[in-house]
Amino acid sequence: MQTVIIGSGNVAYHLAKAFKQNNIPLSQIFGRNQNELQKISSELNIPYSTQDLEDADLYIISVNDQSIEEVSGIISKKNCLVAHTSGSLPKEILAGEYRKSSFYLLQTFSKSKSLDYRKIPFFIETENIEDQQLLTELASKISANVMESTHEKRKYIHLTAVFACNFVNHLFARAKEISDSQDIPFDYFLPLIDETIQKIHEIDPKSAQTGPAVRNDQRVLQLHEQLLKEESLTIYRTINNSIKKMYEL
């Protein structure tokens, strides 16, 4: 099967790398950013182009959500399968007269960070059973966690991911602002962060909750509020109120 990945960002890079590591042939990576495409091509030894899209059986579009519909329109071939990697968009956003699907990888990606692709969940949605089987078999060569998913379920998967990853990372950034303001090395907090993450591998997050809000320790809560300003104070109050509501305090 001839496969082309369209895109040069984080997801496209890691998907191409996963294909390469698992000896899955890639005909081409295609996109607009020549510098990034050159880097991927040089590292992974995959042909690239910014102008001539190779003929393929499968095209995987790994670009930002705002560009998927436009980019999908450049695929003129009708007898092919096209998949996007968006967590929030339906497969129907694809604009051509071909078989449409989604090929969603549940992970946060940075080009500088290596990943164990066997652990990354893949969620597959297609228009027919044959394509579902084809993409499931493809994903299973990369990952041990492959699941069929409708767009409706995928929206909730993506929403959960935003809470569990993007919001948590933002809190790390806010926490570092506080530690930096007092010249406290943020590295000192990494063992606490690591233990917090490791704990939910063994304990339900709700059962693992600690801190002044779940204890309803008003003295500490008020002390913390006196130390915070603007956005961080708003975040602190909002999350503490959410914790209290969850535990009915």
Image (cartoon, rainbow, N blue to C red):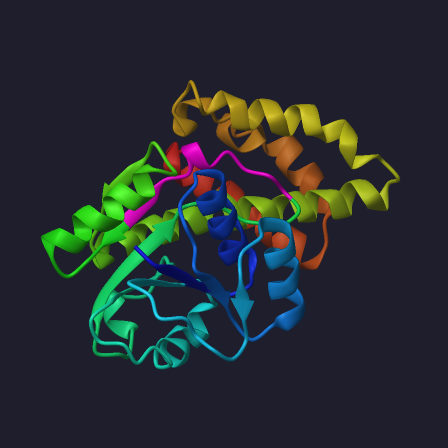
Q: Is residue 67 visible?
A: yes
Q: Which residue is more in the foreground, 202 or 126?
A: 126
Residue 84, how many percent across, how many down? 35, 63
Magenta stretch bounds: 113-123
Q: Nearer the viewer, residue 108 or 11?
A: 11
Q: Residue at x 35, y 70 (%)?
A: 55
Work out which residue is located at the far top of the displayed protein and give it. Answer: 202
Residue 103 on the magenta span? no
Q: Nearer the viewer, residue 166 or 46?
A: 46
Q: Is residue 7 above or below residue 87?
A: below
* Residue shown at the point (47%, 67%) measured from the top left: 63
Residue 110 seen by the camera: no
Lateral position of residue 101 relative to residue 234, left or right: left
Residue farthest toward the left in the current orientation of the protein: 129
Where on the picture, by quarter, is residue 224? top right
* Left or right side of 220 for 163: left
**Residue at horizontal 27%, vertical 76%?**
77
Q: Where residue 80 sits: x, y (%)? A: 24, 67
**Left or right side of 62 for 110:** right
Q: Please state the horizontal and vertical placement of residue 1, each as a whole percent of the image.
A: 30, 55
Q: In this rendering, is residue 103 above or below 226?
A: below
211, above or below 146, in the image: above
